[in-house]
Every structure is written in structure tokens, then in C-alpha cells.
Image (spheres, grey):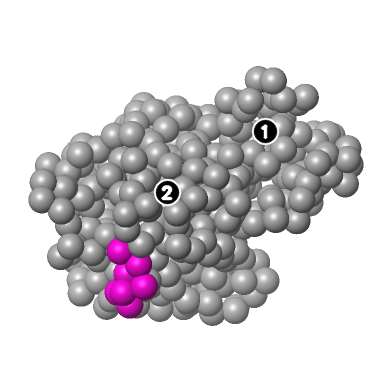
Amino acid sequence: MTTCLGDLDATFRALLEGRSGVGPLRCGDPEKLNVRNGYVITDAEPDAPHPADSPRLAARWLARTVADALADAGVDPARRRVAVVVGTGLRELRAVEQWYADGAELRLAQLHFAEAVRSVAPEVTEVHTLANACAASGYALALAADLLELGEADAVVAAGCDTMTESMLAMIGRVGTATADMVRPFDADRDGVLLGEGAVAVVLERADELRDGQRPLALLRGVGVGCDAHHETAPDPTGIVATIRDAHDRAGVTPDEIGLVVAHGTSTALNDPTEAAALLETFGADGPVVTGIKGAVGHTSGGAALMSLLIAVAAMDAGLVPPVVGLRMPIAEAEKLGLVYGEAVPTRARLAQVNAFGFGGVNAVTIVEACVGAPLGGPS
């Protein structure tokens, strides 16, 4: 995993400490965009003409992350049938902007991620790219599980990636009533969302086909997906609840078994109260503890679902749930939720729910189970 805060270990440590990765933008004019800050990755190639904004960053982060995930899992695409499913909101839109504005080199094939993936894993059998908005990597995870279940692959990499673009920054600036300084999920003083960026990847294998001595990071119990088509941008609590219940049914769990929720939590006027209402309808006032990661890493679009998933696994492994960075006073609609803020809290949760919701009513909810003694660490 690659975020503005680093790899998985670094990101989880920052979350536990309540640190935010917010900083000045690297592209666009803040005055014209009405956006000054973002959650920017600053380790771009130093020899690029514009090191902080070099072309095709999303593909480069993705390739590195997929390679690391395969290495961590001990999966060799040259010896096994390995597919890759990538969830993204924007693909290589920033590269198109740079091609249009500055004449940066760009080939049509580079807009898709197959070329980037095959640069580090040429033997993979297939590469699929899904553009399901901010739930994209949750959908990628669901498709990856389906490919395994159908016997279409021996292992599947589910991934997500996006980089910041002027187009999306302009959209954020137009819909916001004020210039947000940071993302403050569920906070009474929140003033909108800010973009993050990065890449994330996990390797799925069938539990009954694990090799001797292999210990999984976690068990994927189920993914519920849905598109309620309620509105172009506004979320619908009915559609969200339906997707949560679908995820529970697929996972074979009941609400009282869930010990942790990693919320979508975008810090927007509509998402936060809607998500709070959906969680209260599902779990009631005595539900699980709830956290979220966007106050620390921003809204990472296509990678958001899988990044939240890995933080959920890290929290269960460490026995500590990180606080919602930026949350100081919860909105009235979320006062009865078990929101974690201020400092990390201990947990004995073994089942976690991860929410991811996108424009157009595109929803993905994942249920994951901790594996006692599973190895945690590395970038994937």
C-alpha cells in the first residue's frame, strides 16, 4: 500500500498517532481551483521534469504495489494462473491533462493499467480494470473472489489506484462552499472533502488451497455490491443498508458479530449523516466501534476501499483501533455511533466491515475476518 503517509506500516502508525498527511497541492492553481490542500505523495521520480507531478504516477504506483503484493504472498505468475483486477476512479486522467496542456508523451495503451501490470508481472493471465468511482477497489475485490470461485485463476490480485488530477480538484472546488483545510469525517465543523492518492493491492487465494506453512493475512468472508442509482452524487441510506445486509448474508454473519466498522466517512454534508443513519439502522445504538481513514490520507478514490480494508486488518491484528483523524465533535446524526476519536482504543474484534460508496449510488461493503498470528507488514 502506498499513501501520502507511506506504506501500510507507516500509514497505520500515523493513524494511531492521529497524524494527517495533508499538505499543499502539487498541480493546478489553488486560486482558480478553490482548493489549496490535498493528501499528496511526494516520492515521485527525482529526475522527472516536474518531480512532484511526473506523468503516469498512478500506473507506476500500481506496478510497484502489485509486484510487492505478489512477492509478499509468494505467488509466482510464471508458475500459476494469476489474474489482476484493478479498481480506479480516474485511470490515467492526469496523464491526459499533461498531454493536452504540455504535450507530454502519451500512448493510448498507457491509459489502461494492463501495460503497467505486465511490466512487473508479464506472465499474468489477464488484467481487468473497473471504474466504479470511489467503491472501485471494493468491486475489484468482489470480482477477484468470483474469479477464484469459478476456477478461472489460482490466485487473483485485487488492486486500486488513483492520482490527483486538476479535473477532480476543480470539481471539489466547485461543489464546496468553503476551502477545506483537511478532511474531518463526521465532525460538526467539517467543510468538505479533499483528494488523496496512492495504490493498494492484495492477493486472494482459496483457503482450501493454501500451501504448507502459508499463513494468510486475513480471511475474506464476503463482499456485497450494489448500485441504487438514487442520484448522481447524493447517497441513499436505503441503498447503503441493502448493500450492508447483502454483505452480511454473503459472509454468513449477523450484525452483532461485527466488532469494527471502517466507515467511508468523506467529510461531506451528505455522506456523513447518510452513512451514520445507515449504520444505526443496521447495528442500533450499541453497535461496533467505528473509525475511518480519510482524515489522514484523504479520499483516495479507486483505492479507498482496499486501503480501508488493510487498516481494518491491521487494527484487528494490533488490537488497537485508530481514531478518526480530524474528528473533534461528532455531528448530531452520529452521536450514537461508536466513533473512535481523540486516541486509539483497544479492540478484540475478529470481524470487520469496510464501507465504500461512490457517486451514482455505487456501493461496496466488505466483511473480513482476522487470522490469529497472521504476518502483518510490508506494502501490501
Residue 222: which quarter of the image?
bottom left
Label 1 element class: strand
Q: Is 264 rendered above or below residue 323?
A: below
What's the magenta region?
A: 148-156
Residue 323's mark?
none
Q: Give whichever of 286, 369 is nearer the camera.
A: 369
Amino acid type at circle 1 is Asn
The x and y percentages for residue 241 are 40, 74
Q: Is 364 rendered above or below residue 309?
A: below
Local crowd size for mark 2, using a 10 Å CA cut-off: few (<14), some (14–19), many (≥20): many
Left/right placement of residue 154 relative to residue 201 reads left
Nearer the camera: disc 2 or disc 1: 2
The x and y percentages for residue 104 are 83, 39
Q: Give whichever of 216, 261 is nearer the camera.
A: 216
Which residue is found at the position 83% from the left and 34% from the top? 29
For the N terminus, give its image quadrant.
top left
Residue 151 part of the magenta segment: yes
**Marks 2 and 1, Cα distance to the nearest angstrom?**
26 Å
Which of disc 1 and disc 2 is earlier in sequence?
1
Which residue is found at the position 73% from the left and 51% from the top? 93
Residue 336: which quarter of the image?
bottom left
What residue is shown with label 2? Answer: 201
Which residue is found at the position 15% from the left and 53% from the top? 211
The x and y percentages for residue 218 are 23, 52
Residue 161 part of the magenta segment: no
Residue 37's mark?
1
